[in-house]
Amino acid sequence: MTNHLETSEMLLNMGPQHPSTHGVLRLVLKLDGERVKAVECVIGYLHRGVEKIGENRTYMQFAPYVDRMDYISAVSNGLGYCLAVEQLIGAEAPPRAQIVRVLFAELNRIASHLLWLGTSALDLGAMTALFYTMREREEVLKIFENYCGARLTTHAFRIGGLQYELHDTFEAETRAFSEMFKKRLDEYEKLLTKNPIWVERLKGVGILTAEECKSYAVSGPMLRAAGVNWDLRKAQPYSGYEQFDFEIPVLHGADSYDRYRIRIEEMRQSLRIIDQALERIPSGAIMAKVPKVLKPAPGEVYVSIEAPKGELGYYIVSDGSLHPYRLRVRPPSFVNLASLEKMAVGALVADVVAIIGTIDIVLGEVDR
Amino acid sequence: MSQDAKPAPVMATEAWEDGLSDLLHSTFNTADTTAILKRETFRGQAFATTAADAFHPVIAWLRDTQNFDYLVDLTAVDHPSDPLCFELVAILYSFASNRRIRIKTFFDAESKPASLTNLYEAANWLEREVFDMFGIQFEGHPNLKRILMPDDWQGHPLLKERSIVDMDQDWVQKHLGIESGQ
């Protein structure tokens, strides 16, 4: 963006302490009246050097750090990291651990989408949804808490499997949640899906076509809202996702409204996976045989999973020592956010709020 | 895995499963030039190393003729003890064939690799991050400036010569008004 301004134009700083930027995102908007002519994202306020920390910790020591990137879906971060290191050392988690991982990852997907739904609706003035979604998210967090003692940064998995056996009440709690949540999803839809204000604010706003999505390497619900039927759980299944019967919702509007509908439908599909997984938790070990001190042979792997926000990847280079030689995180939020500079051009300032909302970013992951 | 045994290099130089590896080889390696230096697999993942000046053409060819229309990630690795101290790694994905490959290249500190921004929009921010973290300059990038660190920060944090506690003391003192961030 050039700093040259016509007489009718002005620069407006939005954030980093603006509630609708979901954390510490700063936008410099070049405006002509209410119209956005250009946008520049200023990020990095939450940069903690996660990749540098990774090079200075052992493989196991680094595992809890990944929870602090996308802290809304810490379980997914942990799953991706464990899978990457397991691939590097050639280990595989036992079947029982894999099913439990799927269960927690899908519960986490619901929790992540719920927080997204509540806060994005709040940004657009629909305050009620926040109280509904937080109430249901609480039930998911209680299951996490009962399992491992933590609600947000769970560190639920270990390299090679799980540290803890499932708690006795897990199945009952999860079943009760699934039963209750199906009806609650319908309630959200009644609140929002046909609400004229909601539709008016989202439909046709923030369009990013399939071609543009691919060029910007956008992944997750944004890509599927643009008509691309692509989800890593189906395209390159991991943790036994190929055994489950579920669908990938795809819509073609490529706008904010379809991103909303995709996420609602994804929560329904997550429930389907949870219901099936509960029926088939096998007995057996929860940890594979993994050395106490990890010294992977020299080599490099890239492993990615379908996190709630898109493709979350870990590129790990080992030089045969105790520490990763290089540990790169491919963050979905960072890559998806880059497309804002394209989507927001021509929109109104109020639309920018809607667009940021439906990208679904977490600045902890954008900045790392 | 025994703790005492010296880890053996397991990266095998072998042809990839499908014909892409051979096609890559026959397209870019001629009698006088070797553009594809190595083709390897590790743990079932395919990657190729190109000569520094072939990095951009190879990726452009993969995008245009082999449908690798998605730049998953672009990152770098620092090898300070080698003359070719920087390694650039691009991870590509093809929706049509549902496969991922990695293209890598090695170059020295003075070289400026060609920017991939004319091929993929995603390269814009990814290259800015590589520049910010490693100081690698990309030729032809429209807006190459820091993205995560402050604009006036000195140094590139992911270089191996930087310890984890290193920081730009002057910046910290000037902007935060404290003696040290440690």
Image: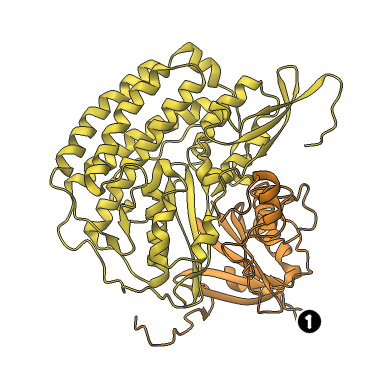
Chain colours: A yellow, B orange
Q: Quadrant of residue A174?
A: top left
Rendered location of residue B61, percent (x, y): 69, 61
Residue shown at the point (68%, 54%) measured from the top left: B127
Q: Which of these two is toward me, B21 or A147?
A: A147
Q: Front-most of B152 and A219? A: B152
Q: Position of residue A83 (x, y in %)?
A: 38, 60
Residue A111 picture location, percent across and down: 35, 36
A89, above or below A331, in the image: below
The answer to whether one can see residue A4 in this image is yes
Question: In which quadrant of the rendered view does residue B37 lie?
Answer: bottom right
Q: Nearer the viewer, residue B146 or A247?
A: B146
Q: Which residue is mark 1?
A: B32
Q: Is residue B92 left or right of residue A89?
A: right
User: Picture coordinates of residue A261 (x, y %)?
Assistant: 44, 28
Q: Amino acid at mark 1?
A: Asp
Q: Is residue A224 left or right of residue B64?
A: left
Picture residue at 38% right of the left edge, 87% below the top: B4
Bin the neighbour count of mark 1 within 10 Å (Cα to Cα): few under 14, some 14-19, many 20 and up: few
The extreme bottom residue here reads: B5
Instruction: Indicate the quadrant containing the N terminus of chain A: top left, top right, bottom left or bottom right.
Output: top right
Callout 1: chain: B
Is the residue A115 above or below the residue B50 in the image?
Answer: above
| Helix, strand or loop for disc 1 | loop
